[in-house]
Image: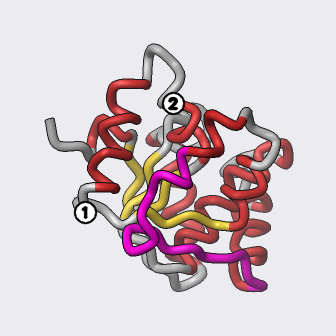
Amino acid sequence: MYADTSVFGGCFEEKFSEASIRFFEQVRGGTFVLVVSDVTLEELDPAPQFVSSLLDTVPAKQMERVVSSDDSKRLRSAYLAAGVVGPACGNDAAHIAVATIALVDIIVSWNFKHIVHYEKIMGYEGVNTIHGYQSPRIYSPYEVISL
């Protein structure tokens, strides 16, 4: 399960903390394997230590790291060219592209404007289909955690 940076920061935002904390508890407990990319790590780098240090709490066996590739960069560009998101949202498109190329099953995010939004999801899926890729499912952490 690929988590974008918003899920990490969500642990420290009142509105999202309960589900974000539960998500990471379930990752540590073995319910999910957390997939993080170089895009996520670059976004976490300037984040406050208390946010970026969440990654250190995840056991190595519960985490997989993936990196951007020429294929993911082309797919990111295709999302932008299709107008799924604008150029200012290039990292959002990069998250989806990297996860798609890595064959991730699910992407979780709190970004309801550029990622977890039905129009955006349809746009990402359309571009993926045109380029021959299977789309990961996109949800908020609320939709994937066990209560």
Disc 2 and disc 1 in contact, CB within 8 angstroms: no
Q: Nearer the viewer, residue 22 or 5?
A: 22
**Left/right of residue 2 with respect to residue 43 in the rendered view:** left
Where is 73 relative to 28, above or below?
Answer: below
Residue 101 % position (x, y): 57, 79
Q: Nearer the viewer, residue 38 or 116?
A: 38
Q: Which residues are magenta?
A: 54-70
Q: Coloring scheme of the render?
A: secondary structure
Three-letter code, disc 1? Gly
Residue 20 % position (x, y): 40, 35
Identify the residue position indicated by label 2 in the image: 10
Q: Residue at image x 65%, y 44%?
A: 52
- Which residue is farthest left? 147
Residue 29 location, quadrant: bottom left
The answer to whether residue 56 is magenta is: yes
Q: Secondary structure at mark 2?
A: helix
Three-letter code, disc 2? Gly
Identify the residue position indicated by label 1 in the image: 30
Where is 21 relative to 103, above or below?
Answer: above
Measure the alpha-carbon separation of dots 2 and 1: 20 Å
